[in-house]
Image: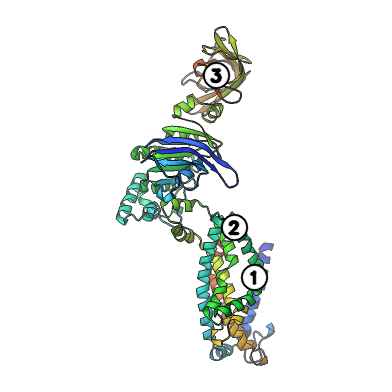
């Protein structure tokens, strides 16, 4: 193998190791968790922490909340990113440069900065502790918009012009020509959107108050940290369960993501 | 089918580039107009304006006397074949060809019938279920033509549709296009930088340069009677031979003189001063006698299959002469005479304008 090959293997190992560590510890017995790798083979295996989680924490409810939020937010986010990105890439309108600049500025802005204004706004609108309140902040995604704008800039406008002379309205062109050809770009935006929405912690923590509205990361963290101590077994079991969908999403769309990232790089 | 009238059309892009400058053209119903010019001369912009993909800065476009300048592309009833073909990659050949009709809500049976008809005409019948990426370059080209054909538009617009094909396919599809035009008699504008395509396909040819029409006329007129030096040089393969010299009044006749070359014309108008002589390769014949117009050394004999070109270096520059069929060919290095045909000599001012001497 080449030197670059070995380097990639090293990076892969470094990336995967914490995940394996997390999964192994979550399967540990009782309070003597296999924290040191030397305990991995001798420590024994059990699903106790998972059982405790399922029976005691309301994890089912958290998971359903997370699924509802990501299930609604991510498709809408993809669609809005594609529509806004396409408009930015193709249309000529006054203020286009400013819009692009603002999108970039929002990308630089830490998400936490929006926390207090959002809380105050949602309190006024009565959106605290509702699904709408959990979903809305994820709909406008500056990364998605900028990524799709760039994606469409690499796509030849000839196809859309052909569709125009063929007699299609701008909306029909977007649905019938543009979207079907956006697969690789949308996969990148979608997986990124899924990651940020699914893993989102601070916003749902602050914007929800009742236990029944908590999403998976928030619910698990609060459950494991009860009573002034951290239940590591439960926390890691919950984290393993919460990570699984993310890994699955990446594995499913791996090829599209790579294609999307390489688009226009002149392979 | 329709006549097309373009009046004082100009297009300036937002970045200040003037793509088209006051162009006026009349295209008759059923005519095939070839638009020829170097890249960046505004010929594609003309097509995009007629298609409605660009909005002119000033001027108007009308079909059958009706102004269409402000109409959306879909309301103009024109079909365009794009340079990059622009086949929809996610659709089959059948869907690609029928898409224009589908967009116009034509009944499915009618669409299907017309698609199959066009596919049969173009030899695509067995490819209807395939996607564009499964087809060869020539087949894709035919699908692009078919997509335009199925629509039965009033005007066809072709934007260098053959530029990406190899020479043989290009020849084949040129024939196909000529055949389709004979068949449908649809008014067409065909943009190309390939003079062979323009001259062989067009009823008339419009030569463009820097956003304006230099000359418009039959292929023969464009070749034999160019209006200026640009057209004379741009059209013709091999290129026209040019000789710098000057006119001198010589008794009743007009004489053109250049180092090692001099000949008299039975001219009506006397004139003097510097001029450029243009000679098509067939306007001079190789002679032997000393009474010929010029003498020179054969540099190269270029055999092109049916044609043979003889490159002769004279004192006044290099001439390319078309050898007479079945005539004896000189050998490189041989000294030959060139007999010029005064009736086919073209003269230009140093600035490029044509000088008419008869």
> On the picture, is B39 further left or further right than B149?
right
Secondary structure of the residue carrying tag 2 is loop
| Label tally | 3
Pick the front one: B84 or B206: B206
**B290 vs B101: above or below:** above
Crowding at label 3, few (<14), some or many (≥20) Cα neighbours within 10 Å? some
Disc 3 or disc 1, which is closer to the eye?
1
Mark drawn on residue B330? 3
Cα distance between the residues tagged 2 and 1 = 44 Å
User: Quick check: can you spot residue A44?
Assistant: no
Q: Which residue is mark 1?
A: A12
Callout 3 touching callout 2 (CB < 8 Å) = no
Tell which tag, 3 or 2, sits nearer the viewer.
2
Alpha-carbon distance for marks 3 and 2? 70 Å
Q: Which residue is mark 2?
A: A95
Residue B111, how many percent across, how many down?
33, 53
Chain at numbered mark 3: B
Query: On the same chain: label 2 and label 1?
Result: yes
Say whether disc 2 or disc 1 marks the residue closer to the N-terminus. Answer: 1
B143 and B191: which one is in front?
B191
Q: Which residue is drawn at the image coordinates 35% and 38% (left, top)?
A: B185
Q: Chain of mark 1?
A: A
In the figure, A32 relative to A260: above or below? Answer: below
Is B109 on the left or on the right of A242, as rendered?
left
Q: Residue at x 32, y 56 (%)?
A: B108
């Amino acid at each position: 193998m080449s030197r670059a090959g070995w380097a990639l293997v090293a990076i892969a190992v470094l990336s995967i190791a914490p995940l394996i560590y997390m999964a192994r510890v979550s399967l540990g017995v009782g309070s003597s968790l296999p924290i040191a790798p030397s305990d991995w083979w001798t420590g024994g295996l059990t699903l106790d922490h998972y059982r405790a989680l399922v029976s005691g924490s309301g994890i089912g409810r958290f998971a359903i909340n997370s699924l509802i939020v990501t299930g609604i937010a991510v498709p809408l986010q993809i669609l809005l990113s594609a529509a806004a990105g396409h408009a930015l890439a193709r249309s000529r309108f006054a203020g286009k440069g400013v819009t692009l600049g603002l999108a970039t500025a929002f990308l630089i802005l830490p998400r936490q900065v929006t926390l207090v204004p959002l809380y105050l706004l949602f309190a006024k609108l009565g959106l605290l502790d509702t699904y709408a309140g959990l979903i809305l902040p994820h709909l406008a995604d500056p990364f998605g918009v900028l990524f799709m704008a760039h994606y469409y800039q690499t796509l030849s406008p000839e196809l859309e012009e052909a569709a125009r002379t063929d007699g299609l309205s701008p909306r029909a062109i977007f649905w019938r020509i543009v979207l079907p050809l956006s697969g690789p770009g949308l996969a990148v935006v979608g997986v990124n959107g899924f990651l940020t929405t699914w893993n989102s912690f601070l916003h749902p923590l602050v914007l929800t108050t009742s236990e029944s509205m908590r999403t998976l990361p928030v619910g698990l963290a609060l459950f494991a940290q009860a009573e002034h101590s951290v239940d590591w077994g439960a926390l890691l079991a919950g984290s393993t369960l919460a990570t699984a969908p993310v890994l699955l999403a990446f594995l499913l769309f791996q090829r599209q993501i790579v294609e999307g990232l390489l688009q226009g790089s002149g392979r | 089918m329709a006549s097309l009238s373009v009046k004082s059309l100009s297009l300036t892009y937002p970045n200040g580039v003037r793509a088209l400058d006051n162009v006026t053209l009349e295209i008759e119903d059923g005519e095939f107009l070839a638009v020829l010019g170097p890249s960046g001369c505004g010929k594609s912009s003309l097509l995009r304006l007629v298609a409605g993909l660009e909005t002119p800065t000033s001027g108007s476009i009308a079909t059958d006397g009706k102004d269409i300048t402000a109409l959306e592309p879909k309301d103009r009833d024109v079909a365009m074949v794009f340079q990059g073909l622009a086949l929809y990659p996610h659709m089959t050949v059948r869907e690609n060809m029928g898409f224009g009709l589908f967009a116009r809500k034509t009944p499915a049976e009618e669409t299907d019938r017309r698609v199959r008809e066009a596919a049969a005409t173009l030899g695509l019948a067995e490819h209807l279920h395939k996607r564009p990426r499964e087809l060869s370059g020539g087949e894709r080209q035919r699908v692009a033509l078919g997509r335009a054909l199925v629509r039965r538009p009033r005007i066809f617009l072709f934007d260098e549709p053959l530029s990406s094909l190899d020479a043989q396919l290009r020849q084949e599809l040129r024939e196909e296009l000529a055949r389709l035009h004979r068949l449908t008699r649809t008014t067409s504008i065909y943009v190309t930088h390939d003079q062979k395509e323009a001259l062989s396909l067009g009823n008339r040819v419009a030569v463009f340069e820097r956003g304006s029409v230099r000359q418009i006329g039959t292929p023969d007129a464009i070749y034999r009677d160019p209006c200026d030096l640009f057209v004379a040089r741009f059209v013709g393969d091999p290129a026209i031979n040019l000789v710098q010299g000057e006119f001198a009044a010589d008794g009743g006749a007009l004489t053109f003189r250049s180092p090692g070359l001099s000949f008299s014309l039975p001219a009506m108008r006397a004139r003097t001063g510097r001029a450029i002589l243009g000679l098509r390769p067939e306007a001079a014949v190789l002679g032997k006698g000393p009474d010929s117009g010029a003498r020179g050394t054969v540099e190269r004999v270029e055999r092109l299959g049916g044609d043979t070109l003889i490159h002769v270096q004279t004192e006044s520059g290099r001439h390319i002469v078309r050898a007479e069929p079945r005539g004896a060919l000189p050998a490189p290095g041989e000294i030959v005479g060139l007999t010029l045909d005064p009736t086919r000599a073209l003269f230009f001012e140093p600035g490029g304008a044509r000088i008419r001497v008869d």
